[in-house]
Image (cartoon, rainbow, N blue to C red):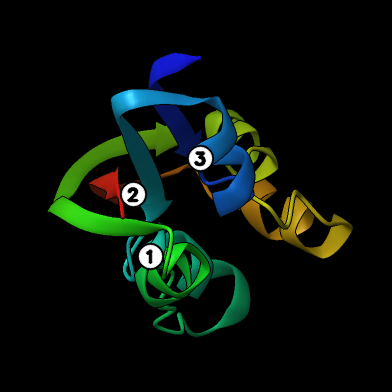
Amino acid sequence: SFRIVMTIAGRRHASEFRRVLAEGGRLVAAVPAEDDLRELRAALHGNALIIDRFGPLLSALEGSFRLETRKVVRHAARIDSKSLLDLLSSTYRGARRSQTEAIAKLDSMDVPTSWTLCSFRPV
């Protein structure tokens, strides 16, 4: 068993988290915040929808875990086009051909990232 179980933008198997979590342990979760990669998504799609990923996390853990702490962490950096492709490849959507072509036209851009970091205790 583990004192800390982490999930980073991953599956939310509350029963499995509980199974491997030691007594008194904690679940730590990181999900992209609503505005994560907003400028990059806008450049690729013409808009950047606000996507709530925290609510579904809470729903998936409801009844098994209670929220202990929540913090949104933001960081921005100027990223060149090759690194933008790498960044896009690390997302759940990956780099599609049309997106690869759109990014290739960019020299660089400022890209903010934002993550919601949470800790949970078993109920």
Residue 79 occupies quadrant: top left
Residue 30 occupies quadrant: top left
- Image quarter hosting the C terminus: bottom left
Q: What residue type is labelled 3?
A: Arg
The CA span between labels 1 and 3 is 37 Å
**Helix, strand or loop under label 3:** helix
Looking at the image, which is closer to me, 88 or 119?
119
The CA span between labels 2 and 3 is 36 Å
30 horizontally vs 80: left or right:
left
Residue 107 appears at what percent x and percent y?
Answer: 49, 42
29 horizontally vs 93: left or right:
left
Residue drawn where x is 36% and y is 37% of the image: 27
The local crowd at label 1, few if under 14, some if 14 to 19, many if 20 or more residues have their Cα within 10 Å, is some
86 horizontally vs 72: left or right:
right
Q: Which amino acid does label 2 sit on?
A: Val
**Helix, strand or loop under label 2:** strand
Q: Is residue 120 above or below residue 61?
A: above
The local crowd at label 2, few if under 14, some if 14 to 19, many if 20 or more residues have their Cα within 10 Å, is some
Residue 15 appears at what percent x and percent y?
Answer: 60, 49
Residue designated by label 2: 111
Specify the label residue 18 is tagged with. 3
Looking at the image, which is closer to me, 36 or 61?
61
Q: Of callouts 1 and 3, which one flags the residue occurring earlier in the amino acid sequence? A: 3
Q: Which amino acid does label 1 sit on?
A: Glu
Q: State yes or no: discs 1 and 3 in contact (Cβ < 8 Å).
A: no
The local crowd at label 3, few if under 14, some if 14 to 19, many if 20 or more residues have their Cα within 10 Å, is many
- Front label number (1 vs 3): 3
Q: State yes or no: discs 1 and 2 in contact (Cβ < 8 Å).
A: yes
Judged from this view, the residue extending furthest toward the right is 97
Specify the label residue 39 is tagged with. 1
Residue 89 appears at what percent x and percent y?
Answer: 69, 40
**Helix, strand or loop under label 1:** helix
